[in-house]
Amino acid sequence: MIVFSEYRKKIFIRYTEKGIVERASAQFLFTIALIFFVLMLITFITFAGRVDFIKLLVSCLSSMLSSFVTMILIRKGMLKSAASFFALFQCLISIAGTLARPPELAMVTVVYFVFPVLVLAAMFTPRVVQGVTLFILIGLLIWNGHRSAVSVLIESETARTGFMKSGTVS
């Protein structure tokens, strides 16, 4: 426990003179980025060899890169920049994930990443970044909804089972 406390002091040394809210926000965002980095690493290791390696590499490494850069920016004392970068980069990853999948599959996979990005933006970023993030993600959802007919979504086994498993459709 003492070792963890020493690492925490070294990581957040630039926040000792800041207020409790900014220090706690930096610690929370750092923890989120670290957990996300580890989860993406586990995902990469788990699915390597099972799915298309290039797609896996792009999706996992881009997420790991955004988490790593966020952690570095937090360590340098740039909380607002770190939060803005993380939220906007995750928006770009959501857009890329939606473009790489058929509309019915995007609605049951990528859409679930949109809501945490909105919460992240609302909690940590300046109002301008919140507005841009909201605009991008709402546009993404509307565009994805219009790029295929509703009848295709209803007939799609992937969408139907995905919505049923998530509790959206009973």
Image (cartoon, helix red, strand yellow):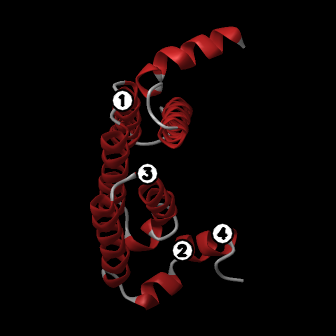
Q: Which quadrant would the N terminus be assigned to in this image? A: top right
Lower sequence index among marks 3 and 2 = 3
Lower sequence index among marks 1 and 4 = 1
- 10 Å crowding of disc 4: few (<14), some (14-19), many (20+): few
Q: Nearer the viewer, residue 117 or 152?
A: 117
Q: Which residue is mark 1?
A: 77
Q: Which residue is mark 3?
A: 124
Tell me: residue 19, above or below residue 122: above
SS label for mark 1: loop
For image coordinates 38% across by 45% down, the residue present is 83
Q: Would you say 63 lies left or right of 99 here?
A: right
SS label for mark 3: helix
Locate residue 51, reporting x and y percent: 46, 42
Tell me: residue 110, above or below residue 170: above
Locate residue 45, reporting x and y percent: 52, 29
- Front: mark 3 or 2: 3
Lower sequence index among marks 2 and 1 = 1
For image coordinates 36% across by 26% down, the residue present is 72
Q: Are marks 4 and 3 in contact (CB under 8 Å)?
A: no
Lower sequence index among marks 4 and 3 = 3
SS label for mark 4: helix
- Front: mark 2 or 4: 4
Q: Are marks 3 and 1 in contact (CB under 8 Å)?
A: no
Could you tell me the amino acid type at mark 1? Gly
- 10 Å crowding of disc 2: few (<14), some (14-19), many (20+): many
Q: Nearer the viewer, residue 19 or 107?
A: 19
Could you tell me the amino acid type at mark 2? Ala
Q: Would you say 131 lies left or right of 41 here?
A: left
Q: Which residue is mark 4?
A: 166
For image coordinates 56% across by 33% down, the residue present is 46
Q: Which residue is mark 2?
A: 159
Separation of residues labelled 1 and 4 (CA atoms): 39 Å
